[in-house]
Image (cartoon, rainbow, N blue to C red):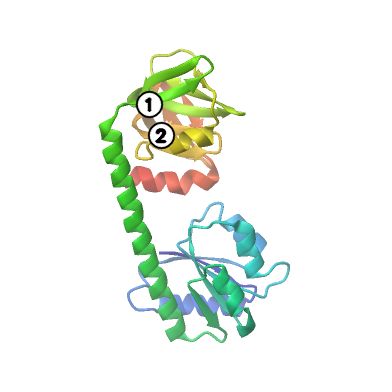
Amino acid sequence: MKILIVDDEELSRNAIRMSLQNMPNLSTKIQIEEASNTTKAEEKLKSFVPDVVLLDIEMPGETGINFLQRLGIVTFQTVFITAYHEYAIQAFKQNAIAYILKPIDDVDLKVAMQKCHTQIKLRKKARDYTLLKELVQHLSYKKIAIPTQNGLDFIELEKIVYLAASGSYTEMFVLGNTKPIIISKNIKHLEATLPKVDFIRVHDSSIVNRKHIVKYVKGSGGYLVMTNDILVNVSKRKKEFLMKLLLS
């Protein structure tokens, strides 16, 4: 379980970290990162993908609630930690899984983490089911209809190496073709169409077919070497997600 503690008080962060590390059945399975304000937390989220965010509310610059609202849809579980009980309603409107008052009670924190653990397992089961369903669908067909400027092209999925965004159009690089196919749809539309079992969004402007990945080269985000030595950049934000998929 990856946990991000966001609190402007160092003593509070230290107390939370110590409590988590001493928690039975949790201490050897957690990775903890810290941020002293929402600006640093947002920067941290670019490279660290938490399962749980323990979020203070009253902080200089921006409250935890405003921060969460600004982020929009998030994939982590949120536990609000604050000295002020009057924020409870606002916190739960942000789908917080728990609301803990300072000074933090170890029992309250343990209950909150158990709730988070349960939700994470449920999400994983739902995700596994979705991937299994997509795999079955994927096995039932081997071609995809691609809208082009001239009509429809039927492309074998296994031959698609990667896709690159080009404004409101997308360039599809196919094995055996020297030039890309220009598709009259944006890359977001195609991401929703292609089976996620094989096709991975590794950058805002790129989707790759994992079957054509030859090598991953480390870097800030790094890059992939694809079939025929095509190089595709990986964004820092997508790097950890990509590693999880490739190593799973």
Task: In the displayed orientation, state which residue is furthest to the right.
Answer: 61
Q: Which residue is mark 1?
A: 144
Could you tell me if residue 36 is visible in this image? no
Alpha carbon distance from label 2 to label 1: 8 Å
Q: Helix or strand or loop: what does disc 1 sit on?
A: strand
Residue 43 place in picture, x, y as percent: 61, 55
Residue 105 place in picture, x, y as percent: 48, 86
Which image quadrant: the N terminus? bottom left
Q: For the point 51% across and 56% down, which residue is it?
A: 48
Q: Taking 167 as reference, is 32 above or below it?
A: below
Answer few, some or many: residues within 10 Å of disc 2's Cα (few below 14, many 20 plus, some between 14 and 19).
Answer: some
Answer few, some or many: residues within 10 Å of disc 1's Cα (few below 14, many 20 plus, some between 14 and 19).
Answer: some
Q: Nearer the viewer, residue 173 or 145?
A: 145
2 and 1 marks in contact (CB < 8 Å): yes
Q: Which mark is residue 194?
A: 2
Q: Nearer the viewer, residue 197 or 146?
A: 146
Callout 1, which amino acid?
Ile
Q: Helix or strand or loop: what does disc 2 sit on?
A: loop
